[in-house]
Amino acid sequence: MARRPPLLLLPPSEGKAPGGRGSPWRAGRLCAPELDERRAAVLAALAAAMDRPEPARSKLLGVKGAALTAATLADAHAADAPTLAAIERYTGVLYDALDYASLPSTDRRRVDAQVRILSGLWGVVRPRDPVPDYKLKMGATLPPLGRLSTWWRAPLTAALAPEVRGRTVWDLLPHEHRAAWAPDLAGPGAPRQIISVRFLDEVGRSGSTDLVVVSHWNKLLKGALVRHVVATQLDDVDALATFEHPEGYRYEPSLTERHDDGIRVGVSLVKPSLRAH
């Protein structure tokens, strides 16, 4: 039996394009329609939360001032607002670096088929699924549902189970989104392997060189990796040795971490310090 192509799990972006041309959300329009009741529940809870006092809305959404005003308006009307394809809606640095529109048509089709985006509002969407403008983090606590990563975990894991079975999964999720997915690593539906990636900078300090995890540009760096995985259909850790990241990061095999379950693998891409050249 032919090996299934890799699957890439991504977060949505904080930045989102406004407006839209598509009809509003309704049940059956997104992937994993078994999640639609929960999607409707989050939409209703979010709209209700937009009637709360400003401090409560600011705490929930993580913004203030004009950004809070815009987010409140978007969230209050998310259930009946016009939509855009998720790949067009999400405009943050990861998606800018992925630059979907510039990909060859074959790679765009691969993105459509092989990328899944975990969302605090929708659970999971495909790149071409239509979504409205909104603001809601997976790590938010939304009354009366509670912390969304916990609330989504069981149904989202079940919805993703047939997607991940037997595949190499590139887990490019931040912690709050990773907390919403608890795959079975021992049963017949287990992924072939789950690869998570760290980007590290070599930094010279007091005559020695330390490795420092990149945080600010992490999403930007992951966008280029997504392009590479999609183009090459890379599903083997060692094949990362051929990856030439545009920012100079290279796979460092000695830092690979293989977990006891035999499925989870952590890899590191390192950018050498200028002192090394």
Image (spheres, rainbow, N blue to C red):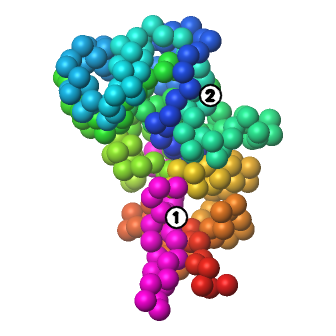
Type of secondary structure dominating the magenta stretch: strand
Image: magenta residue range: 189-217
How many circles with numbers are drawn on the protein? 2
Q: From the viewer's perspective, is 199 left or right of 104?
A: left
Q: How many other residues sit within 10 Å of disc 1, few (<14), some (14-19) or many (≥20)?
A: many
The quadrant of the image that shows the C terminus is bottom right
Q: Would residue 3 be visible to someone looking at this image?
A: no
Q: Residue 93's spot in the image, x, y percent?
A: 56, 44
Residue placed most toward the observer, 148 or 90:
90
Q: CA distance from mark 1 to mark 2?
A: 26 Å
What numbered label is drawn on residue 19?
Answer: none
Q: Amino acid at mark 1?
A: Phe
Residue occupying the point 48% across, 10% down: 81
Q: Residue 37's spot in the image, x, y percent?
A: 35, 16
Q: Residue 142's spot in the image, x, y percent?
A: 24, 27
Residue placed most toward the observer, 199 or 187:
199
Q: Residue 16's spot in the image, x, y percent?
A: 52, 29
The tag earlier along the polypeptide, 1 or 2, is: 2
Q: Amino acid at mark 2?
A: Glu
Badge 2 is on which residue?
A: 88
Seen from this angle, which residue lies furthest bottom?
207
Residue occupying the point 65% across, 44% down: 98
Residue 134, quarter of picture = top left
Asked which secondary structure carries label 1, the reply is strand
What numbered label is drawn on residue 199?
Answer: 1
Residue occupying the point 32% across, 31% down: 64
Q: How many other residues sit within 10 Å of disc 2, few (<14), some (14-19) or many (≥20)?
A: some
